[in-house]
Image (cartoon, helix red, strand yellow):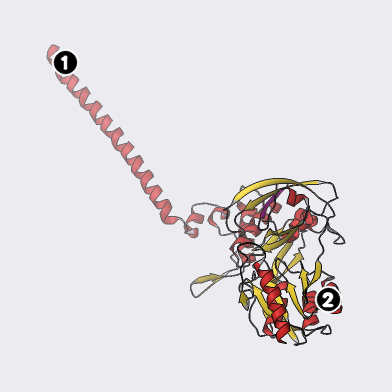
Amino acid sequence: MTQLKGPKRLVERTKRERARNVRLMQGLGFFLALAVMFGAGFAVRGNTSLLSSLGFPGSVTGTDVSPSVSGRVGGEFVGSLSARVGEVESVIKQYSLDSYDVDSATTAALDAFAEITKDPYLRYYTPDRFAALSSGDGARYSGVGVLFSEREGTAYVVDVFEGSSAQLEGVREGDVVVAIDGDRSQKWSRAEVTSALNREPGTTVVITWRRGETTSSSEQGTEFTTTLTCSDQTEANVSWLLEDEVGYIRVAQVNSTSTAMVQRAVQELIGEGAKSFVLDLRGNPGGYLNQAVGITSLFSNAGTVLRVRTSASELSKSTTEAQLTSAPLVVLVNGDTAASAEVIAAALQESGRATVVGERTLGKGSVQVTRPLSFGGALRYTAAYYLTAQGHPLDGAGVTPTVSVGNDGEGDRQLNFALDYAASASSRS
């Protein structure tokens, strides 16, 4: 019996080893099958017929998704943005497990769209923001004592009224609006700032400014915050005086009464003995185009004042008022002279009617239109460009002065030069 014990153990051990080897081979085969299936998944991905034969539904294979409305031309896909977005929206709506708020998605999509266009003034207004922008009646202006202009869609200060709340808090020319009452969710345009500050006199508003950088594309500069009191305090839009025999007229902005006020100024100054004129448009952010044409007409009968180019046509604007004076004229401009104020300077310079003195103007020779949308929001976009009578663009180019004069140093060098130049011109005429 003891002699059989060794062989029996050997047989049992051999059986156990064979069983273990079988299990190892089975495990190895399972992992190899998984690897083959994983690789096959990459091979069949996009093969809708094979996926369908394996039993996957159309929502996975894509066979029941509407075909793209964009086609392929010359190897590239073509089609409108709305068609592409519509296709994506359709897929998400029908097959995605996610959901989205249509108002938030609209704002995000249109804000992103505005950022990638070449129009720096393109802006989407949500229904709430558009309602706030449209709430003013336009009959009066209540504010914080600041005159605003706009560069690349962002409002900045071009003038601070004497004794105003803004002046007392140290607001200066060139300061950029960053936020109003804590809202910094967007760039603040001139129209939005003016509307937001048109409040009941005595109410306060918190404005955050950036100093040291006036371009909307830059985050440089120092921020500071002021709490200002709104009031009906205004500054005369057109002011004038006689300096020796030079009639000086300052136009702060081109509003609905500017032509009539400049006409009154010219007539009174002539009556006081003016033999030449200085028209000061420095810091003027522009305004009504028809008023710019009217002001130009008071000094010139040259005919065409400017051309307006739209997507459909190009039209000309000509002098409309009777010329009041042919006396020597100097037009003062600087880097904040913009829009329709640039039209005045360019027209009087090109016609040879005036000598332009100062610095190159802003170059904001475009017209923005705000169009309401069917779902309550609105879109602001550039609808036209200003060209001079000779066809030169103003947008991005501005008006180059006949005589360049900076305002560095003590006093107002530009004004002093303009007055002297006008006086000497009248003595030569």
Q: Secondary structure at mark 1?
A: helix
Where 277 falls versus 222 (above or below)? below
Locate the C terminus by quadrant.
bottom right
Q: Which circle marks residue 5 in the picture?
A: 1
- 183 falls in the magenta region: yes
Within 10 Å of the Cα at label 1, are there few (<14), some (14-19), or many (20+) other Cα atoms?
A: few
Q: Give the image location of residue 421, x and y in percent.
A: 68, 77
Q: Is residue 310 visible?
A: no
Identified by mark 1, the residue type is Lys
Where 316 falls versus 268 (above or below)? below
Which residue is under mark 2? Answer: 269
Viewer-nearest residue: 37 or 319: 319
Q: CA distance from mark 2 to mark 1?
A: 137 Å
Q: Is residue 82 visible?
A: yes
Locate the N terminus by quadrant.
top left
Q: Quadrant of residue 127?
A: bottom right
Q: Quadrant of residue 387?
A: bottom right
Q: Give the image location of residue 51, x and y in percent.
A: 49, 55
Say whether residue 64 is left or right of residue 45.
Answer: right
Q: Give the image location of residue 247, x and y in percent.
A: 78, 75
Where 20 falls versus 9 (above or below)? below
Within 10 Å of the Cα at label 2, are there few (<14), some (14-19), or many (20+) other Cα atoms?
A: many
- 429 falls in the magenta region: no
Viewer-nearest residue: 98 or 340: 340
Identified by mark 2, the residue type is Leu
Residue drawn at the location 29% of the way across and 37% of the way down: 25
Residue drawn at the location 68% of the way across and 70% of the way down: 416
Tag 1 or tag 2, which sits nearer the N-term? 1
Q: Which residues are magenta?
A: 173-185
Viewer-nearest residue: 285 or 163: 163
Q: Give the image location of residue 403, x and y in percent.
A: 62, 77
